Image: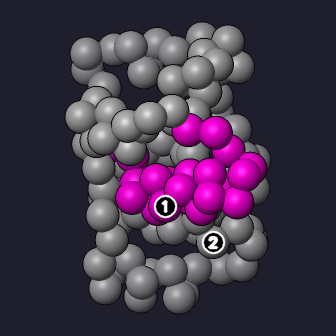
Amino acid sequence: MRYLLDTHVLLWARSAPDKLSREAIAILESRESELHVSMATLWECAIKSSIGRLDVPNNFYRIVAREYTLLGMDITHLEAYASLPMHHRDPFDRLLIVQAQLAGLILLTRDRNIARYDVPIVMV
């Protein structure tokens, strides 16, 4: 199966796996899982780090790039984003929803608002 990690899932997987469900841990550890991280997630981490709301370890972005498949964005993502219903106001989560929809990925998240969209999710 192919999965896209929400920002908090990525951070918890790396530093606080006890916050994840057994199902989420099984998915993250399975050799059958293809794990993706959005560049939007890394951008969100960089923004929060630069304003002092998140402490990321040295080489965090490069480590993530080595351990996960990075998912970029293009014009089709922007077009889909523009037509996405406003069930959720967080721009980074909305980008993840669009990326999961267009790439056929299952979104790993704890955010119940994401369930309001037509995107497969696993609640962690």
Q: Nearer the viewer, residue 55 or 11?
A: 55
Q: Which residue has dot 1 on it?
A: 43
Residue 108: image x %, image y %? Answer: 54, 38
**Magenta segment, which residues?**
34-56
Q: Tag 2, which secondary structure?
A: helix
- Quarter of the figure with residue 65: top left
Q: Is residue 24 left or right of residue 91?
A: left
Q: Nearer the viewer, residue 3 or 38?
A: 38
Mark drawn on residue 91: 2
Find the distance from the CA under tag 2 to the CA under tag 1: 12 Å
Residue 49: image x %, image y %? Answer: 62, 52
> What amino acid does circle 1 point to?
Trp
> What amino acid does circle 2 point to?
Pro
The image quadrant where one finds the C terminus is top right
- Quarter of the figure with residue 84: bottom right
Residue 111 in the image: above or below residue 116: above
Mark drawn on residue 69: none
Residue 110 in the image: above or below residue 96: above
> Of the residues under marks 2 and 1, which one precedes in the sequence?
1
Residue 74: image x %, image y %? Answer: 29, 78
> Residue 123, can we see it?
yes
Residue 117: image x %, image y %? Answer: 62, 63
The image quadrant where one finds the N terminus is top left
